[in-house]
Amino acid sequence: MKLQKAVLAMAAALVFGGVVCAEETTTEAPDTGVQATEEAAADGQEAAKQLSEKWTDFQLQVDGVVYQFPMMYADWAALGWTTDAENLETVLEPYQYTTVRFTKDNEKCTAYILNLGINNMPVEECIVGGMTIDSYDWDLTEGEVVLPGGLVRGQADLAAIEAAYGTPSDTYEGDLYTKYTYEMDYNSTYELEVFKESGVLEYIAVENFVEPEGFDAGEASEEVPEAVTAYQKPAELSTDLTAYEIELDGQVYALPVPVSTLLADGWELIPSDTDKVIMANYYGWAGLMKGGQKFSTTIHNEEDYATIPENCWIDTIEVGGYDLELDGALPGGVRVGITEEEFLTILENAGIEYELTSESGDFKYYRYNNADYGHYCEVIIYAGDDGHFPVNTIMKVACSNEFE
């Protein structure tokens, strides 16, 4: 079984770091498995709709029954598809999906199972966002598969597909087949492959990763996690320059730090800049304000359930510069306002390796304690002459210590 994070148009504000595609390798389903009852299957067939004429309605008709994607897993199982219990025990994080192999009589397919809720959920509580059918697992002579517009698998050719759906969004010419892709959005597509030997449609993949009508995304818990309760705030900055600590407006924080710790020190959440709910094992945004100073930062939920911003963590803090004009310092005497020469002397006397990572215009960027990605201390030296900051002094300090 392959787990992926879904990239969904409906969640453009929740960026997953790039385009992610499911691999074609999937989990085989043995002949034994979780069986839907005949009564449930009959209910599913009675609820079936008439097959649409438009591919943008994301339907398939299989053995006379219309499948509407997306659908809840329970509705999928009611149609008679089975897999083994181990697959059903898989737990998906929010906006994660997996591919699972299913069997029904002599027909086999792969279905896309996705979690669009805010809490971690097992496969059985998730959504079926689409399916793939190919001639390796599902012989052309087994059953009948009809696409919107009446295109029949095993009969329709390229001309028939274009006549029904128009010019495809993309065309791929392979040695064995021609693939037409019809795309409404990145995760709302049809892929149709007409094999050159047979001249007819053999492979179908339909994806529609959106919320079904009436979908319940779940609720967030306000319970304070044990790790948040156990956090111990340092009384003062360490003398160890390798410690991931930072002083912000006279208060010292070991990173990562709970949002609630900053709130206890007088910071307030800015409602318009703060996500109300942070999904399980995911991140969101928070705006914090104290007096006339404010900053925006990512916050991370390390729990297996959705929660409120107060129960999340901040792993990176920057102090100083033009954005947050407050006193700031790092361990060992590295402080906003000291000179570049004083800063480098502190590092060299402590035997700390550092790197001048960038020198651009009025600014010089130094990093040290740079163990790996997401773990570093940084200072920015001002080398300009506009008078806003003393020349050749530290204008900003930053510290980052991300969760593994």
Image: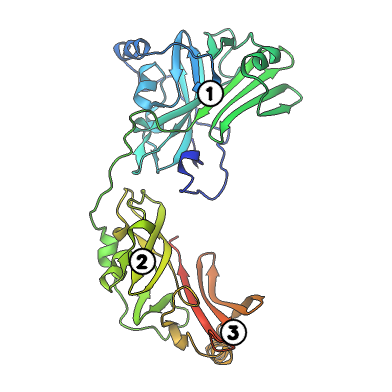
Judging by the rendered image, the residue that carries numbered circle 3 is 386
Q: Which colour scheme is used?
A: rainbow
Q: Which mark is residue 288?
A: 2
Tell me if mark 3 has few (under 14), some (14-19) or many (20+) residues whose alpha carbon lies within 10 angstroms of its own.
few
Tag nearer the camera, 3 or 2: 3
Q: Return the residue at label 1.
A: 56
Question: Crowding at label 1, few (<14), some or many (≥20) Cα neighbours within 10 Å?
Answer: some
Q: Quadrant of the C terminus?
A: bottom left
**Residue 177: which quarter of the image?**
top right
x and y percentages locating residue 21 in the rendered image: 57, 38
- Image vertical order of residue 276 relative to residue 77, above or below: below
At label 1, the amino acid type is Thr
Q: How far apart are marks 1 and 3 (CA)?
A: 57 Å
On the picture, is 150 further left or further right than 162?
left
Please tell me which residue lies in front, 50 or 77.
50
Q: Marks 2/1: CA distance?
A: 43 Å
**Viewer can see residue 220:** yes
Amino acid carrying label 2: it is Leu
Q: Which of marks 2 and 1 is nearer the N terminus?
A: 1
Q: Percent position (x, y) of residue 96? A: 45, 41
303 over 35 or under it: above or below: below
Residue at screen point 63% across, 21% down: 192
